[in-house]
Amino acid sequence: MHFKYLIFFSVLLAFTSCKQSQDETKESLTQQNKTQDITEQDIATLKYVEYILDSKTNNIVKDWPEYTQLEEVITNVKKGDLSYFIDNEKVTKLLVKELKQNIPRELNSESILSRILVLETKLFQLESLSNLTTTTKEELLENIKAFLVSFSNLSFQMNKKIEFDNRSIEKP
C-alpha cells in the first residue's frame, strides 16, 4: 500500500518538475532574444573611424551594383536592422562572389582585393553570429563594429588607390 503512494508521488513530482523546466527554458529564450535586440543608438555608440568615398572614387563605383548593394546592407546594419543576415547565406555568398568578380578595372589591385577578403570574413562572421540564439548583445556589437571597420577600411583603400593613380609627378 505504501509502495503505491510512493510511486504516485514520484510520478507527480516528475511531471511538475518537467513543466517548470520547460517554462524556465521559454523564459530564458525570450530574455535572450530581448538582450540581442540591437538598436540604432547601440550602433551609434560604437567608436571607429568611418571613411567615405571621395567624388572620384564615387564616380568609379557608381557602375558597380554589388558595391551599391553592400552599401545598402551597411546602411541597414547601422540602423540596427540585421534581417539581411537571417537565413540568407546563399545570397550573401553570391554577393561576395560577384563583388570580387565585377570589380572595376581602376580598383582592381591586391590591396583592394585583400580588403574585400577581410570584409567577406567579417560579413560571414556577423551572419553566423546573428543567426545564433546564444550570442550576447556585446558579442554582436563587437562583430558589427569589426564589420563596419572593415567596410570603412575598404573605402579608405579605394580612395588611396584612386588618389595614387591620379597623382602625376613631373621628373626634372
Image (cartoon, rainbow, N blue to C red):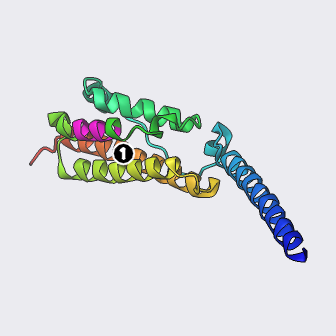
Q: Residues within 10 Å of mark 1 (few under 14, many from 20)?
A: some
State the image quarter where residue 72 is shown. top left
User: Which secondary structure type mostly characterizes the magenta part of the structure?
Assistant: helix
Residue 54 seen in this snapshot: no
Query: What's under tag 1, amino acid-wise?
Result: Phe
Q: Nearer the viewer, residue 87 or 141?
A: 87
The picture places residue 81, in percent across and down from the top left corner, at 56, 35
The residue under the point 22% across, 41% down is: 100
94 within the magenta span: yes
Helix, strand or loop status at disc 1: helix
Residue 47, given in percent of the width and then of the height, sits at: 59, 52
Q: Nearer the viewer, residue 12 or 159?
A: 12
Residue displayed at 89% across by 70% down: 5
| Residue furthest out toward the left | 172
- Who is closer to the viewer here, 29 or 38? 29
- Specify whether 126 is left or right of 43: left
Q: Quadrant of the N terminus?
A: bottom right
- In the shown orientation, is residue 131 left or right of residue 171? right
Whole-percent x, y for residue 90 in the image: 32, 38
| Furthest residue toward front | 1
Q: Residue lying farthest bottom?
A: 2
Q: Kindly indicate the quadrant of the structure image that contains residue 88.
A: top left
Q: Which residue sits at x=86%, y=73%?
A: 6
Query: Which residue range is magenta in the image?
Result: 92-99
